[in-house]
Image: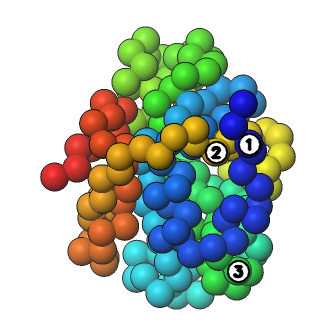
Amino acid sequence: MPPRLTRRFFDRSVHEVAPELIGATLMVNGAGGVIVEVEAYHHTDPAAHSYRGQTPRNAVMFGPPGFAYVYRSYGIHWCLNFVCEAEGSASAILIRAIEPTEGLAAMRRRRKLPEPRDLCSGPGKLCEALGVTIKHNGLPLDQAPFELRARVAEPEIVVGPRIGITKAVEHPWRYGLKGSKFLSKPFR
C-alpha cells in the first residue's frame, strides 16, 4: 500500500505540491479515489481567498500546512482545499476532481446518480459525494476522517489556466491527469 501523506508533505510551495497530488488517493470516511484535477492558490494571487487578509472564513489558510480548508462556493457547494506552505503563508490547493474508486455506493446515494463519471467531476460534486461539509474545515489531513496516500507511479500531467474564477485567470495553475474522463472540464 502506498505511504500516507503527512502534514510535512504540504509544507512546501503550492506549485510543488499541486502537481504531486495528481495520482494520489483521497479518502474521506472510506469513500474516495484518485485525485485527477487540482488548482493552486497562492496568497499573492488575487483569486485566493487569503489575498485581502485573514477573516473568520479563511482563517484556516493562515494556519499550519496539512489542514483542510472548506468553504461554500456561491452559497451552494462546499469546496475542499489543502493548506500548503509555512504557517502564515495562506496558500492552498483546491481539489477539483477525483476518479471514484472506493465507497461508490455511498457516493451514489449522496449524489443520487448512478454514473461514476458524474460523482466527483467538480469541486462541489466531489464534496457532496464524499460527504465533506464545514465540519471538515480545520481538520488535519493526516488523520481520520481523511486518508491521503501517495501516488504509486508518476502520471502524465496537463497544465492550464484555472477555471470558474474571474481574477488572475491567466495563471497556469490548474493541474490534471492527462486523458482522464473524470476531469471537471477538459484541458485545452
Quadrant in which residue 74 is drawn: bottom left
- Closer to the camera in the image, 57 or 81: 81
Position of 31 relative to 39 (above/below): above
Kindly state the secondary structure of the residue where label 2 is placed. Answer: loop
Q: Residue at x 47, y 46 (%)?
A: 154
Crowd band around label 3 with a 10 angstrom C-alpha radius: few (<14), some (14–19), many (20+): some
Give how far apart the Cα atoms at labels 3 and 2 are.
21 Å
Lower position in the chain sequence, tag 1 or tag 2 = 1
Q: Residue at x 58, y 42 (%)?
A: 151
Residue matched to label 1:
3
Seen from the viewer's position, the closer of residues 99 and 51 is 99
Distance from disc 1 to disc 2, alpha carbons, whole Å, reads: 6 Å
Is any part of residue 18 visible from this angle?
Answer: yes
Quadrant in which residue 50 is drawn: bottom right
**Residue type (three-letter) at the residue carrying disc 1:** Pro
Return the mark for residue 36. Answer: none
Residue 137 figure quarter: bottom right
What amino acid type should be assigned to the residue bearing mark 3?
Ala
What mark, if any, has residue 150 been given in the picture?
Answer: 2
**Residue 156, position as x, y percentages in the image:** 35, 46
Horizontally, is 57 left or right of 66 in the view? Answer: left
Q: Residue furthest right?
A: 143
In the rendered structure, the answer to whether residue 117 lies left or right of residue 65 reads left
Q: Quadrant of the N terminus?
A: top right
For the residues carrying marks 1 and 3, which lies nearer the camera in this image? 1
Side of 107 relative to 181 (left or right) = right
Q: What residue is shown with label 3?
A: 86
Q: Nearer the viewer, mark 3 or mark 2?
A: 2
Mark 1 vs 2: CB contact within 8 A = yes
Picture coordinates of residue 128 (x, y %)?
A: 55, 34
Sequence order check, earlier mark of 1 and 3: 1
What amino acid is at disc 2? Ala
